[in-house]
């Protein structure tokens, strides 16, 4: 197995982990819907949205790196 192939495989693992973290973050967002205090609920949902946005940026950068390795 070549170094590029191993690196590509590891990048795939990272992308999979990011997807898992995004799912966990979505669970936090959904669970916050049960919070009755509107300010607290909004704060948690805003943070969860920002976490999701940052995870998507990381995922996109990983895809760019994978393409550059081809």
Image: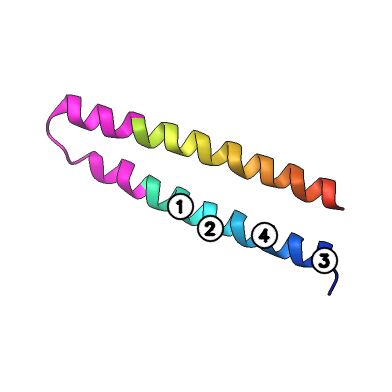
Residue 45, given in percent of the width and then of the height, sits at 31, 33
| Magenta highlight range | 27-46
* C-alpha distance separating marks 3 and 4: 14 Å
Which SS class for mark 2? Answer: helix
Q: Earlier in the sequence, mark 4 or mark 1?
A: 4
Q: Is residue 64 above or below residue 53?
A: below
Of discs 3 and 1, which sits in the foreground? Answer: 3
Of discs 2 and 3, which sits in the foreground? Answer: 3
Q: Which residue is mark 2?
A: 17
- The single residue placed furthest to the front in the displayed view is 3
Counting other residues with Cα less than 10 Å from the Cα at mark 3, is it few (<14), some (14-19), or many (20 or more)?
A: few
Q: Earlier in the sequence, mark 3 or mark 4?
A: 3
* C-alpha distance separating marks 4 and 1: 14 Å
Q: Which mark is residue 3?
A: 3
Q: Are marks 2 and 4 in contact (CB under 8 Å)?
A: no
Residue at 62% in and 62% down: 13
Residue at 12% in and 34% down: 36
Q: Which residue is mark 1?
A: 21
* C-alpha distance separating marks 3 and 1: 27 Å
Q: Is residue 39 left or right of residue 23?
A: left
- The single residue placed furthest to the left in the displayed view is 36
Which SS class for mark 4? Answer: helix
- Magenta portion: prevailing SS class: helix
Residue 47, given in percent of the width and then of the height, sits at 35, 32
Q: Is residue 57 left or right of residue 40?
A: right
Q: Earlier in the sequence, mark 3 or mark 1?
A: 3
Q: Quadrant of residue 14?
A: bottom right
Q: Is residue 15 above or below residue 65?
A: below
Q: Total of numbered circles in the picture? A: 4
Which SS class for mark 3? Answer: helix
- The single residue placed furthest to the bottom in the displayed view is 1
């Amino acid at each position: 197995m070549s170094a590029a192939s191993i690196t590509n495989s590891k990048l795939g693992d990272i992308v999979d982990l990011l997807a898992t973290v995004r799912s966990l973050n979505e669970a936090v967002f959904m669970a916050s819907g049960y919070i009755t205090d509107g300010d607290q609920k909004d704060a948690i949902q805003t943070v969860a949205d920002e976490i999701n946005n940052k995870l998507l940026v990381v995922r996109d950068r990983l895809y760019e790196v994978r393409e550059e390795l081809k």
